[in-house]
Image (cartoon, grey):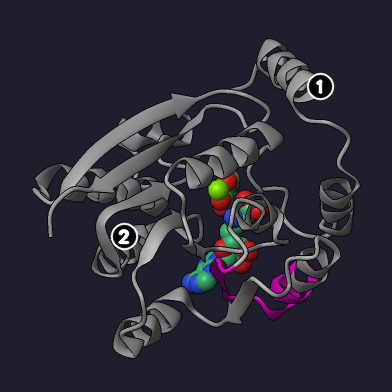
Amino acid sequence: MNDDRWDAVDAYATRLLQPADPVLEAAVKESAGLPNIAVSAAQGQFLHLLARAIHARRILEVGTLGGYSAIWLGRALPDDGRLISLELEEHHAEVARRNIARAGLDGKVEVRIGPALDSLARLRSDHGEPFDLVFIDADKRNTPEYFSTAVDLSHVGSLIVVDNVVRQGKLIDTETEDPDAEGMRRLIEQMGADRRLAPAVIQTVGVKGWDGFAFALVVAS
Ligand code: SAH
Ligand code: DHB
Ligand code: MG
């Protein structure tokens, strides 16, 4: 499901609110051989705004691809800020590292290669500082596990954002067995049952079609 008017509104907002940005344009160009599934420009800008609104100093991303969302998030960091982004595919990580370096963010943004479940387990056992913001945007069927670990790696006040929860309405279609949509259903149930969280789901339309984000603010430990 798509609508030219959704694209037109995204184009309009992007034209008025985003000045020409050679670094992001290069990141998009250099990612041409990768799946076309990065967040949109409007969504990237929104993630950037969220990170700044909560003064995020430590950000965790699950699913790097070519580093497009990592650049938007990395640019929101203060001088001593840090973003760790987890990526399964070595080739995606290589493209991302180049794009991140071009953005001048290689001092702040680190891409870690491997299955996110393993990288997250390592982060947990490292007992490092908690993350202020987590953006989950990798394989959808493992999202409930990523989300649980994200809560464990958070503090009261941390914000967790999950991409692609609505999936053209497949979120609520229990007839067809789609493990990705099923993963997102488990996620929403999990969010609703966890008294430590203030959750929300917001549907979106735009150049990425009909989809949505889930948000969870950690309000108690
Ligand atoms: N956040 C990116 C898009 C990520 S696309 C952006 O908006 O710019 C999803 C990414 O998750 C892909 O690069 C894919 O290779 C990666 N991925 C898939 N399964 C994974 C896993 N098990 N562990 C880590 N990354 C995974
Ligand atoms: C897919 C993954 C994404 O992260 C996204 O934003 C859109 C689509 C996918 O796997 O199809
Ligand atoms: Mg996504």
Which amino acid type corresponds to the residue marked 2 in the rendered image? Phe
- Local crowd size for mark 2, using a 10 Å CA cut-off: few (<14), some (14–19), many (≥20): many
Q: Earlier in the sequence, mark 1 or mark 2?
A: 1
Give the residue number, with chain letter if any, for mark 2. Answer: 147
User: From the viewer's perspective, is the residue at label 1 or at label 2 nearer?
Assistant: 1
Q: 39 and 166: which one is in front?
A: 39
Residue 128 location, x and y as percent? 36, 82
Q: Which residues are magenta?
A: 80-96
Q: Quadrant of the N terminus?
A: top right
Q: Which residue: 41% across, 51% down?
A: 180
Which amino acid type corresponds to the residue marked 1 in the rendered image? Arg
Residue 173 location, x and y as percent? 32, 33
In the structure shown, which secondary structural element does the residue marked by tag 1 occupy? Answer: helix
Give the residue number, with chain letter if any, for mark 1. Answer: 15
Q: CA distance from mark 1 to mark 2?
A: 34 Å
In the picture provided, is 183 more to the left or to the right than 49?
A: left
Ligand 1: does it lie within 8 Å of the C-beta at label 2? no
Ligand 1: does it lie within 8 Å of the C-beta at label 1? no
Q: Quadrant of residue 152?
A: bottom left
Determine whether 120 is above or below 181 in the image: below
**Residue 81 lies within the magenta run:** yes
